Image (cartoon, rainbow, N blue to C red):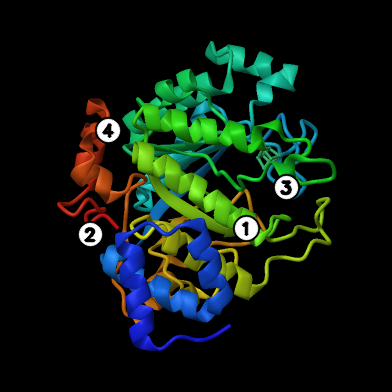
Amino acid sequence: MDGLDLSTTNEIAQRIQNIPITKGEIIELIKKYDSKSLCTISKIIRDSCKNGPITYSRKVFINLINLCRDTCSYCTYKKELSDINLSILTKDQAIHIARLGKRLKCTEALIVTGERPEQKYPEFKEWLKKYDCSSTTEYIEQISNLILEETGLLPHTNAGTLNYDELSVLKKSNVSLGCMLETASDRLSGKNMPHEFAPSKNPKARIRVLENAGKLKIPITTGLLIGIGESLEEIIDSLIVIREINQKYGNIQEIIMQNHVPKSNTKMRNFLPPSHDLFLLTISLARIIMPYMNIQVPPNLSPNLYSTYINAGINDWGGISPLTIDFVNPESPWPDIKDVKHATEKAGYRFRGRLAIYPEFLLSKRDFIPKNLWNYITPLSDSSGLVKEEIN
Ligand code: SF4
């Protein structure tokens, strides 16, 4: 494998921006050039196609219900009814967190639940009845509306494989939704693989969510979990699947490239995390495959690598909370927002707050946003579609 001279790098970057790269061409690039060279190409593409600031979303993490019907071999988010860290938030508790977040200038309420807990836990199904709900989605709808009305924070829900009707209900109160593809490989749902006991992680189920969100014109966040046993070719296939959905519906608002951090109390505790080199390669491939996409790396899963990720072509740091922990990765504290700002500016880029919905939807895909949500979006956003600078 070779390094690249500057003129060749510019030439390749220019071509990729104009014509979507094929799988064969990607494999050729990987064979020919090392990850450092591909990161250089990726950075040039980012500077050309996403030449605004590097963004983040100031959020609160509302850990609404951490029961889950499924079991993934790497997960510590899911809890059992007897667990000391079980979270089933009442409306008052959820609103309290959102209010505290508002005081700390947050603009996003990230609402997270496990996969359809009511299907596995009759006690929880019974609990939902006190709010006249028969499903987790109905409860999320109530919570989202309350947060909007009481605080003006913009809800963004990640509740797994919502069906078409559920998506259409949550569209009315959520400016965007989230559903990680993680991988498009069926192989990882096979025997002894991480998704063996998680039917909701079957790629077909996840792709259906992304496509239904597309049909409903819902901006959606997705992404890959890197280092759970997939091959590099499967990573490329997964990114191409996301590109195809976005080409058809235009609804993918960002791709999170998340490195798997093995946790001691899981089945995958002895699994090796992805190497630094492989992870950087996958970030560069995400940008090379989707030049105009918002590409994010969570800043808390491998701290102090800010300039490295910026130089690999990302343009977003995702949600960072000044209040709540990352309940999916509780062992990885959020960095101080001031430190991320400092590192971003030191790398030569502006650092700005964005909403839970990306500027392109506010500026040129306005038909993705239900009329009622503009009442909450407009007071928070400026003419560039980012959060007004006086807010955060
Ligand atoms: S579906 Fe989500 S919450 Fe449930 S076990 Fe898998 S990763 Fe954990």
Image position of 237 (left or right of 347): right
Residue 208 or residue 337, whichever sits in front: 208
Give the residue at x 55% y 38%.
Answer: 112
Q: Read off the residue under disc 3.
A: 76
Q: Name the residue beneath numbered marker 1.
A: 233
Give the Cα separation between the discs numbered 1 and 3: 28 Å
Quadrant of res 89: top right
Quadrant of the image where one finds ligand 1: top right
Say which label, 1 or 3, has the lower sequence index.
Answer: 3
What residue is disc 2 on? 389
Identify the amino acid type marked 4: Ile
Label 1 residue SS: helix
Q: Element at badge 4?
A: loop
Q: Is residue 367 above or below residue 27?
A: above
N-term mark: 2 or 4: 4
Write down the residue under mark 4. 369
Amino acid bearing label 1: Glu
Classify residue 237 as left or right of residue 366.
right
- Position of residue 64 measured from the top left corner of the image (x, y, whole percent): 57, 34
From the top left corner, tell me how far across and down residue 76 is, in percent. Answer: 72, 47
Which of the two discs, 1 and 3, sits closer to the camera? 1
**Label 3 CB, ligand 1: below 8 Å?**
yes
- Residue drawn at (51%, 52%), measured in percent from left and top? 239
Q: Is mark 4 within 8 Å of ligand 1?
A: no
Mark-to-mark CA distance, 2 and 4: 22 Å
User: 173 or 270: nearer the eye?
Assistant: 270
Number of disc labels = 4
